[in-house]
Image: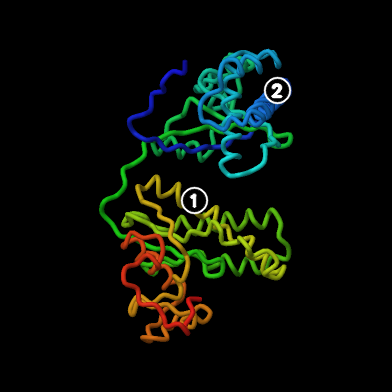
Amino acid sequence: MIKARKHASTPLMRRSCRVYLNDLNKGKAKILCEFLRLCHDVIQYFIDLFWQRRDFSASLADLETVHKGRDSFKITTRLAQALAKQAKECVRSAHSHKRHKPQLRHHTVTLYYHFVKIEPFKGRGFDLAVCLIGSGAPRITIPIHSTKLINRRLAEGWKHSQTLRLGRDGKRLWIDLIFEKPRPKPKEAGNIVGMDSNYKNGFIFSDEKMVGQDIYPRVKSFFKRQKHTHAEIKSRVGCALKQVDFSGIKALCIEDLRYVKHGKSGTFSRALNRRLSHWLYAYVVDWLSRCCEEEGVRLERKSPAYTSQYCRICHRWDRRSRVGDEFLCVHCGYSEHADLNAAKNLALLGVAGVYGLRSLQNPKPCSASQSFG
């Protein structure tokens, strides 16, 4: 019998802060590496078992399966149940995205309150103590230093969760501390703003605010596509988005670019592909979703089709209306920056409450000789 879970009456936001265990002594580091290796093998064992059974449900593993893993690896029932739960999540996620059987490459484990306790460090030199309290985990205390991000989270009212993640990145051990905070209610007052994301012109909003225009010149200066170039652009994107003021916004409408690269293989040159790889729209959406959640702003994805070619004045679209970065309607003569016009059309979709321009009531399309573009 599976016990019913008690859900919080107020939805919670969760954020993680990673701390590398650079000051951990060799003895404790060796114990943690052996524990992570064991957890990795057990999770992969359960993944193979569930995948073979075609068990993609969200329910917890049955006790017979848990005991089978417990007896095979000589671990406790509680640890086997926790690792089976993580394996279930991996299998279910891979199946829902139509992927092959997951193969764990990294040594990572999620430890719940049964295995860990976080408390202030009793002594000097460290700020927090992560105590592994058994139930299958090794009984050791891991001292850690508080970081600027952790201090900022605590100052903003975030609380330590009873769960954390422990992992290894190469030879470096790390801990992800989980912070929780009640989710604010969505704003009822404010403006609906559209945002056009362009790898060349940065981020343009329908209220005519523009940020991130210095990113593309920097991308053009890169000779190769390397890890440090993506890290630099990610930092620049974060700095640019921090300039956005969400105080007067109740809904932010962005382009749905999840499938923007589908079917584009071999279309562009190597130089253009290198520049497009620095267009971190997935990172931008993730950053905006977290920020909007904290600010109580609704984040809505809209279809990007024809947004830069649609005229809000005469309600027509034509591919001839856009030339480069300029929009000039061939029907009524209305002119504007193409990306700004796209941002305003995204805001229009948010006001109308529809996904794409084709869903607008009573559109006035071009004639048969005028294509949509």
Residue 38's label in the rendered image is 2
Q: Nearer the viewer, residue 294 or 316?
A: 316
Location of residue 114 in the rendering, given as x and y in whole percent from the top left corner: 52, 18
Q: Which residue is mark 1?
A: 287
Location of residue 272 in the rendering, given as x and y in whole percent from the top left corner: 67, 69
Location of residue 121 in the rendering, given as x and y in whole percent from the top left corner: 53, 22
Give neighbour class at mark 1: few <14, some 14-19, many 20+ (Cα, 10 Å): some
User: Measured along the vertical axis of the image, is residue 287 above or below residue 357?
Assistant: above
Q: Is residue 208 left or right of residue 51?
A: left
SS assignment at label 1: helix
Amino acid type, mark 1? Trp
User: Measured along the vertical axis of the image, is residue 185 above or below residue 35?
Assistant: below
Q: Residue at x 33, y 78 (%)?
A: 313
Q: Quadrant of residue 349?
A: bottom left
Q: Residue at x 37, y 48 (%)?
A: 295
Amino acid type, mark 2? Leu
Q: Residue at x 52, y 37 (%)?
A: 16
Please say whether residue 147 is visible from this viewpoint. yes
SS assignment at label 2: helix
**Labels in figure, total:** 2
User: Measured along the vertical axis of the image, is residue 225 above or below residue 174?
Assistant: below
Please say whether residue 326 is visible from this viewpoint. no
Location of residue 245 in the rendering, given as x and y in whole percent from the top left corner: 38, 57
Q: Is residue 306 left or right of residue 282?
A: left
What whole-number distance in Å separates the C-alpha atoms at marks 1 and 2? 34 Å
Q: Quadrant of residue 159?
A: top left
Q: Is residue 252 left or right of residue 241?
A: left
Q: Residue at x 54, y 56 (%)?
A: 258
For discs 1 and 2, the disc positioned in front in the rendered view:
2
Whichever of callouts 1 and 2 sits on the residue coming sooner in the sequence is 2
Q: Nearer the viewer, residue 69 or 189?
A: 69
